[in-house]
Image (cartoon, rainbow, N blue to C red):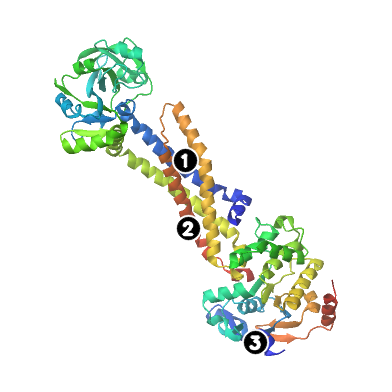
Amino acid sequence: MNYALQTLWHERSRFMPGILAVAFSAVLIALQCGLLLGLFSITSIPIDHTRADIWVGSPKVLSVDLGRPIPATHISRIGSDRRVKDTEAYFQSFASWTKPDGGSDLCVVIGSDLNDTCMGSISELTPAMRVLLTQPGSIIVDQDELDRLGVKGLADKAEINRQSVQIVGLVKGLRSLAGPYVFCSRETAKNLLRPVIPTDYLTYYLVKCHKEEDAPILVEEWKKEYPDMAVFTSKQFSLHSQLHWLTKTKAGVAIGYAAILGLLVGMVVTSQTLYAATTASAREYAILLALGIPRWRISGTVLIQSFWVGIIGLFVAYPAVNGFAALAALGGVNVLLPWWLLTGAAGVTMFMAMISGLLALRSVRQIEPMTLLR
Amino acid sequence: MSDDQLALRGLQLSRSYGDGAVRTYALREVTMDLYRGQLVLLMGPSGSGKSTLLAIMSGLLQPDSGQVLVRDGGKLRDMWTMTAREREHYRLRHCGFIFQGYNLFPALSARQQLEIVLRWGGDGLGDVRRRADEMLTLLGLGNKGHLKPSQLSGGEKQRVAIGRALIKNPDFCFADEPTSALDWSSGERVIELLRAAAHERDATILIVSHDHRILPYVDVHFHLEDGRLTEAEIPFAAPMAAEAWRDKP
């Protein structure tokens, strides 16, 4: 076994604060970024929970919920391409929700086709729900938004843009940031959004390609050809929407600041742990220096120890991150932990551990064989 | 002794500590010749400058004035005209050290304490393990190579420390109070090992110690007092003790 690793194992109680500090940093970074992703994934629910390959909207649209009306005639631009399998009109806009008690709030009305092969209907809507939504004025909302909407549940009535609507179904896990999502049929949406979306206009065209891999190519072609409309693949639009909210709300800055603080705390503790461990072995190292062993060998040992402290810290952090994420999920908080986030958090934490090792090298510089003779 | 046998010469070495009115002289123009194959004892009261002289002779401490002449390619060269890297390399090739206390890595086995010197000293290829085992066997620790310091007695730990100093087969070994923490039976064993290293490996061993029981085993005995060196008379028993030791199996 490597001498550095062997020492680390033998003196594990000495190295434990460093390992825990690394784990703390990794957990903090991963959870905070995961929370952020979870939070802003809400903004792209209409994209992520539907099946379109391409979204066509108003030029320079900032986020899926901020789409402005586009002419229905755009269908002629996109529907004729032989790579396109299907197109579908999609309505979405903010609207005024009037509660039964007279109070009002903002909501986001989403109207799409409801047949079995449609693209715009969110996956949480069951066939039975889609049938119920075909009735004019029927809507479905998230059950956790009922309080915000001032209603109690199924069959309750309210008004959207001064038109009566009735709740015919409830879904779960589709809460929104800006205003509660209200899902309905395309016809109902057209009706409710008449004040903001003129006749012969819609918010988005959804496109399904024969081959999914054609989507990015079509997007690039249409972007060049039609500058008066925005074109995204679903993935691009989802990320675009999330990034807009991330930067607009400055939440990313706040979370980043907290993550940097966590990193700094981890770095200081890890560095001090390695420093103390090296100082504790100073006499043994001093003997080796007296014997002519180059100082870089000892520095190398400290750096190898910092590497292993980092690796072990990450092994401690991984189950902790997943455990905390599961706990958060129980409380209704969505923490997203994609592989790239976990890899990134691990990379940043390892970098921090190695920097800690470099900082601890000052202890090696202080070792002098002469001290053994005093 | 002929100059051919001269291994290390300290010439007019002076060293002081402090400044101005509080300056104290640890060494005053000390000259010391060390020859190959000798076990040399340096004695003197506390604060007489013994450790300072050992540090200067071994290249760990620079004298204020004087020279430390070592053989380098057949010629004598002042160690303190070497660069720090050259001096480090010189110590790596030629010097072993034994200090007060054992200073063994708690996490490493006895064998690894020896191996680390070879591996990290750039001599790590090939038969490192065999050399470590041979040294441990020579030290009477053949069956204890796997034990960690906490599982060894004081005498055994000091023997491992000696093994660490001798594993490179150095030309010089500098030992600072190597028996101070040991009972005499263990200390005697340690001195016998150092004497064997001097006589069988043709090494020069310089011991700094207060322990008068070592006297019968040494070849040369220096006495240092107030920073001045005198060559003391070897006790009558020394050659006999040495011969008796040589006859041991």
Tell me the element at label 2. helix
Q: Position of residue A331 (x, y in %)?
A: 44, 27
Q: Which amino acid, by three-letter code, is at mark 1? A: Val
Using the image, determine if residue A123 lies above or below residue A17.
above
Tell me the element at label 1. helix
Circle 1 packing at 10 Å, graded few (<14), some (14-19), many (20+), is many
Quadrant holding the N terminus of chain B: bottom right
Q: Chain of mark 3?
A: B
Q: Which amino acid, by three-letter code, is at mark 2? A: Leu
Tell me the element at label 3. strand
Decide which of tag 2 and tag 1 comes sooner along the chain. Answer: 1
Q: Position of residue A21 (x, y in %)?
A: 50, 46
Tell me whether the residue at label 1 lies in contact with that at label 3, contact meaning CB atoms closer than 8 angstroms.
no
Residue corresponding to mark 2: A358
Q: Which amino acid, by three-letter code, is at mark 3? A: Thr
Using the image, determine if residue B106 lies above or below residue A33.
below
Cα separation, mark 2 vs mark 3, equals: 43 Å
Q: Quadrant of residue A101?
A: top left
* Numbered mark located on residue A98 in the image: none
Residue corresponding to mark 3: B31
Which residue is rendered at x = 48% and y = 37% of the image?
A321
Left or right relative to B143: residue A36: left
Residue A119 visible within the image: yes
Residue A241 visible within the image: no
Q: Chain of mark 1?
A: A
Residue corresponding to mark 1: A27
Circle 3 packing at 10 Å, graded few (<14), some (14-19), many (20+), is some
Quadrant holding the C terminus of chain B: bottom right
Which residue is rendered at x = 52% and y = 75% of the image?
B84
Circle 2 packing at 10 Å, graded few (<14), some (14-19), many (20+), is some
Number of the front mark, 2 or 3: 2
Q: Position of residue A234 (x, y in %)?
A: 29, 32
